[in-house]
Image (cartoon, helix red, strand yellow):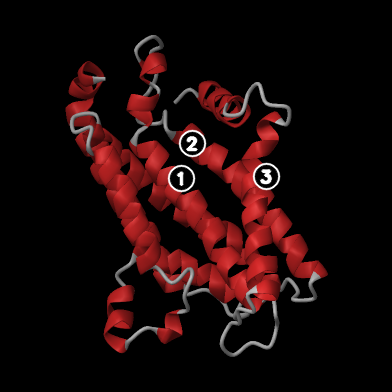
Amino acid sequence: MNIGLILELAKRDITEKYSGSTLGALWNFIYPLVDIFIFTVIFANLMGSRLPGSSSVYAYGFYLTSGVVAWNAFSNTVLRTATVFLDKKHIITKVKVDLSSFPLYIAISESITFVVTMGVFLFLLLISGYGVKPLVLFVPLIYLVQQLFAYSLGFLIAIFVVFVRDLREIIRIALQFWFWFTPIVYVYDILPEYVKKIMIYNPAFTFIHAYHSVFIYDQSPDLKAILFLCLLSFAILLCAGITFKKLERDVRDFI
């Protein structure tokens, strides 16, 4: 693993996306901040959306924000990791890199955006009077497991995307369905009982519900569910590693 190369790629990923614009890398953070503003101000004050069981006008906005911020980091990591071998083939074909660790720069880049966005979210929680409880200390653990799952899943898919290019679009569509199957915009409690029973098999529900527990419901996250997701992530990563080892030569040839 070339740590220096990964860190340099992460730096470029943040700075080059909007190179040439006046604000440059700041656009990476402006878009998430606009989302937070819309969720907390538009939904709460103008649309009058309320979270069942809470009297706070900001509760639903914060519920939505905590889920969307986490989902964006997760889905961006999965999608971008899944297509990284094709997106960066101009580097891979010219520089000898360890392809198994190469996509890590995406996880680092997305994590920086997450940290900045989450920092603004915590600031809003404080100034709104909603408050930040000590349970927020669980957030790094939840995020670590979430991103481990995202990277493992994305890396496994990336191997096959090289051979089946249409998988890129299939993954985009799948993530859209996954988003709406996960209680991010709506509340888990309103779901029919049979859907609740199915929901426990949704890995994204594990970490989204954990964020909601910490920020909205003032409860400790389900650590057993987090542990299971962690073990699932390692299992997928192991599967991806074995598959990549067998197909690495073909992957490099097809790139």
**Residue 81 seen anywhere in this rendered image of the structure:** yes
Give the number of marks: 3
Tell me if 246 is positioned left or right of 104 in this view. left
Front-lying residue, 17 or 208: 17
**Residue 228 seen anywhere in this rendered image of the structure:** no
Residue at figure coordinates x 48%, y 57% from the top left: 71
Give the amino acid at mark 3: Ile
Q: Pointer 1: what residue?
A: 76
Task: Examine the rendered structure and indicate whether residue 159 appears above or below residue 195.
Answer: above
Q: Pointer 3: what residue?
A: 30
How many residues crowd mark 2 within 10 Å: few (<14), some (14–19), many (20+)? many
* Mark found first going from the N terminus, 2 or 3: 3
CA gap between label 2 and label 3 equals 19 Å
Give the amino acid at mark 1: Asn
Front-lying residue, 214 or 177: 177
Q: Pointer 2: what residue?
A: 106
Q: Quadrant of the C terminus?
A: top left
